[in-house]
Image (cartoon, rainbow, N blue to C red):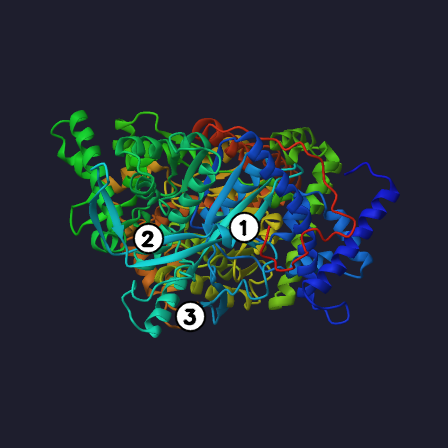
């Protein structure tokens, strides 16, 4: 697509322009006279989608020809971010589209900016799933992402009076040009009722599930193009519809109105995404969502398999299911049910197939995030699955007994049924029991799984727990979000780094080059200027883009310790107030992130950040040196702006709490330096970039365990540290709350009397480390050198590397290259529009 004659290029641009006009007219039903920005956005997006369809059809044909193993990534969340810009970059069509738009009188950037992102995820876990889809396509590995098409995604956050307010996310209301509905592939999903025994004609005893509700799952496919390859995989999201031909008497309602009520109830299942992160939501609707996702996806995989094979005995050779956390763990009994009850396999064969098909990724060590369902709730919704779990568990515990005779404690811990109090189904144990491989998401995390959380499983199945450190895609997180840096890097070392991130090492020799340093600083400064302008437009806060931009964006959670960051800010504030002539290294502190709507402390922390901001930003004595900005509604779109503009990345969770983190990777790739604890992937980032290029502070996991054993007393730290005491006292006495001592009492009390995440123990080390950061920032050359080296040494954290590791260590899959060359659309460009319904492929 690069070496093209001017004539050829003109022809292509003209064709694009005709396609814009065609889509505007035929799909939107408007002309340029009346078209809105949204109409243009849709017309441009449809034009691109039509081109992707060619690649997609080629990819599918290749699959049919080669019959390779397909990765099926099952995830309750896919935080895609906006599609248009990413797809243009991956397909290598950005320049063509920009020119065609300009010649049509449109501004492509403005159109790109108009796209509202689908909020189908709440944080890192959902974003990881999409980085992995990008890498799977880019590496030409056949894959399907399976998820839920929530009608209302992650809530929109506004800050009102310093408090988080939630607003519903109506992401579909302006139309979604990327999805294609596939009604012919709909599946039925059942709930409730009871099971019964029957005998086949041959006298074989079998079980039948008699559900009380049957609903339909309809898939919507979103194409996922790889970077400059011909592979297009897809993300298949399921949406509920009421059963089209339900029989009133079957539902035993007898009257029309309750049948309509059933319809509404069916549709409720995929209405809304649960917005809690690292916290279980023990709601019945959530379990319904999980089962709905799993049942549709497994039925779909089986249907695809049986379209090419006569039996399911080799199912696992063609389909590799990956469970993103335990949310889809009910796949274990559901695959058993489909094999045994529906496809009539015998139990042992079915169990063999199941255990070779499914793998499980653990994402957390936090006890409150370990999913478990009250037994009664589970049994009333999925009676057959509970029976299957009982039977699997019975056999499994027999194995444990044989291996560890008389070890009742172990039996109790490993049982899928928690019987220590009220009875629960433990989803972690279910996933561990049914998985071929269990993996953690960073070296430290996996070691902690092996040593603590899943120690029994590691002992029973040595080698089953493996590590695959997370990664992020450099296409979205550098090429799309940071075009200036992309251009600078490509000018220096060519463009191969975008598909082999280790190539960034070739920047190392330039780390001390004065001209390159100057260019590097200029990129950062311009990114900062963009952000400063945005702030000025939005909130009338004026900042100098030469000050340090110190950023913490991520979900608000006590373990992530945004309030430790605040304690540092208050400490700086106190220093200046105590000594008005003091000059510190000026900083803009940027925060962003959503709190779960029911998470009291997290919401207070947001209020605290905004209250401290209010006081400091309005105090002439300090505001030239410290400013604080809370960006509302943190999302992928905001991430595009924030990761490229940061000088300093705050990764300050308590050691052992953040499984991996991926924000840490995005910052560092974009040339931010990290201040962080030895937690999650920070450990490996520090190893890669070199300890001299990373600001480390805080207790290690071992020190924390020791301290906890001894008995941790936060009050000791408080009493022995004057500046810590002063900082907490300012919060306590109402300095940031107009004298109100109640407002932040819960935060202060939790720090002084509990401090589960040990902020007070890490406080002084953090402050000292921040002082080193400030001193270093004054030395532009050293800082820039470190910044360049951070980017240069981040090769490991490409999601391409993660996916290659999964392919080798977990999935045993190979790429399936699609060699077909770019296929031109027919001259009129309307091959796929002839019926203009948007609902066919
Ligand atoms: C990367 C990302 C996250 C994860 O950030 P962490 O710092 O790893 O918690 C969350 N939300 C969005 C929008 C992201 O892009």
Q: Quadrant of residue 776?
A: top right
Q: Tell me, yes or no, if residue 174 can be seen here.
A: yes
Residue 183 as seen in the image, left or right of residue 516: left
Distance between mark 3 and mark 2 Cα atoms: 22 Å
> Which of disc 1 and disc 3 is earlier in sequence?
1
Left or right: 655 in relation to 376: right
The answer to whether the residue labelled 2 contacts the one labelled 1, judged by CB atoms less than 8 Å apart, is: no
- Between the C-alphas of marks 2 and 1, the distance is 55 Å
Which of the marked residues, 2 or 1, is nearer the chain's N terminus? 1
Counting other residues with Cα less than 10 Å from the Cα at mark 2, is it few (<14), some (14-19), or many (20 or more)?
some
Given residues 258 and 704, the one toward you in this image is 258
Q: Report which residue position mark 1 lands on.
A: 221
Q: How many marks?
A: 3
Q: CA distance from mark 3 to mark 1?
A: 49 Å
Location of the N terminus (image quadrant): top right
Q: Give x and y (percent) for residue 203.
A: 20, 37
Residue that label 3 marks: 737
């Amino acid at each position: 697509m690069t070496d093209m004659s001017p004539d050829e290029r003109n022809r292509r641009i003209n064709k694009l322009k005709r396609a814009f006009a065609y889509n505007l007219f035929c799909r939107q039903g408007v002309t340029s006279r009346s078209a809105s920005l949204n109409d243009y956005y849709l017309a441009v997006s449809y034009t691109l989608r039509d081109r992707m369809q060619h690649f997609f059809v080629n990819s599918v044909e290749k699959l049919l020809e080669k019959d390779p193993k397909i990765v099926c990534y099952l995830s309750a969340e896919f935080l895609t971010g906006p599609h248009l810009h990413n797809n243009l970059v991956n397909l290598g069509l950005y320049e063509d589209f920009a020119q065609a738009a300009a010649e049509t009188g449109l501004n492509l950037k403005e159109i790109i900016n108009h796209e509202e992102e689908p909020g189908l995820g709440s944080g890192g876990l959902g974003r990881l799933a999409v980085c992995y889809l990008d890498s799977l396509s880019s590496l030409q590995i056949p894959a399907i992402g399976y998820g839920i098409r929530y009608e209302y995604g992650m809530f929109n956050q506004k800050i009102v009076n310093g408090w988080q307010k939630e607003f519903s996310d109506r992401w579909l209301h302006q139309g979604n040009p990327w999805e294609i509905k596939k009604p012919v592939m709909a599946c039925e999903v059942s709930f409730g009722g009871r099971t019964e025994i029957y005998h086949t004609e041959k006298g074989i005893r079998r079980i039948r599930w008699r559900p009380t509700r049957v609903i339909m799952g309809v898939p919507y496919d979103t194409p996922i193009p790889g970077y400059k390859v011909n592979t297009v995989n897809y993300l298949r999201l399921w949406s509920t519809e009421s059963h089209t031909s339900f029989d009133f008497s079957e539902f035993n309602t007898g009257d029309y109105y309750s049948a309509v009520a059933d319809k509404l109830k069916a549709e409720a299942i995929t209405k809304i995404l649960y917005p809690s992160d690292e916290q279980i939501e023990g709601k019945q609707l959530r379990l319904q969502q999980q089962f709905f996702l799993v049942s549709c996806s497994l039925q779909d995989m089986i249907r695809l398999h049986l379209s090419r094979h006569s039996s399911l005995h080799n199912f696992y050779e063609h389909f590799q299911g990956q469970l993103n956390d335990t949310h889809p763990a009910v796949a274990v009994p559901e695959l058993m049910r489909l094999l045994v009850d529906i496809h009539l396999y015998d139990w042992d064969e079915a169990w063999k197939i199941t255990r070779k098909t499914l793998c499980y990724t653990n994402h957390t060590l936090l006890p409150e995030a370990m999913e478990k369902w009250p037994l009664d709730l589970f049994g009333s919704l999925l009676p057959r699955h509970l029976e299957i779990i009982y039977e699997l568990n019975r056999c499994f515990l027999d194995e444990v007994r044989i291996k560890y005779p008389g070890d009742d404690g172990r039996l109790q811990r490993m049982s899928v049924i928690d019987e220590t109090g009220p009875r629960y189904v433990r989803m972690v144990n279910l996933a561990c029991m049914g998985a071929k491989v269990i993996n953690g998401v960073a070296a430290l995390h996996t070691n902690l799984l092996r040593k603590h959380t899943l120690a029994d499983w590691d002992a029973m199945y040595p080698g089953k727990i493996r590590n695959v450190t997370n990664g992020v895609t450099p296409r979205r997180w550098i090429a799309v979000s940071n075009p200036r840096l992309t251009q600078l890097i490509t000018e220096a070392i060519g463009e191969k780094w975008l598909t082999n991130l280790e190539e960034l090492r070739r920047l190392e020799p330039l780390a001390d080059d004065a001209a390159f340093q100057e260019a590097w600083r200029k990129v950062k400064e311009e990114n900062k200027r963009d952000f400063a302008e945005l702030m000025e437009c939005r909130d009338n806060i004026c900042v100098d883009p030469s000050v340090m931009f110190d950023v913490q964006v991520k979900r608000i959670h006590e373990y992530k310790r945004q309030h430790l960051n605040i304690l540092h800010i208050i400490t700086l504030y106190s220093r200046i107030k105590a000594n008005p002539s003091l000059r510190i290294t000026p900083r803009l502190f940027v925060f962003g992130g959503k709190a779960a709507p029911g998470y009291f402390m997290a919401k207070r922390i947001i209020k605290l950040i905004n209250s401290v901001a209010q006081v400091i930003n309005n105090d002439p004595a300090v505001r030239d040196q410290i400013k604080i900005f809370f960006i509302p509604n943190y999302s992928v779109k905001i991430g595009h702006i924030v990761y490229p503009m940061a000088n300093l990345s705050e990764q300050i969770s308590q050691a052992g709490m953040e499984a991996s983190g991926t924000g840490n990777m995005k910052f560092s790739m974009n040339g931010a330096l990290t201040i962080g604890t030895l937690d999650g992937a920070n450990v490996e980032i520090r190893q890669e970039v070199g300890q001299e290029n990373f600001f480390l502070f805080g207790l290690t996991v071992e020190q924390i365990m020791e301290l906890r054993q001894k008995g941790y007393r936060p009050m000791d730290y408080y009493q022995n540290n004057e500046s810590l005491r002063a900082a907490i006292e300012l919060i306590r006495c109402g300095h940031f709350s107009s004298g109100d001592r109640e407002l932040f009492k819960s935060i202060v009390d939790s720090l002084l009397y509990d401090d589960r995440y040990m902020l007070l123990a890490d406080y002084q080390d953090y402050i000292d480390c921040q002082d080193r950061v400030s001193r270093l920032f004054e030395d532009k050359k050293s800082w820039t050198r470190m910044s360049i080296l951070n980017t240069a040494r981040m090769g490991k954290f490409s999601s391409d590397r993660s996916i290659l590791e999964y392919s080798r260590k977990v999935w045993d899959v190979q790429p399936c290259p699609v060699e077909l060359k770019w296929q031109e659309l027919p001259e009129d460009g309307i091959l796929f529009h002839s019926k203009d319904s948007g609902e066919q492929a």
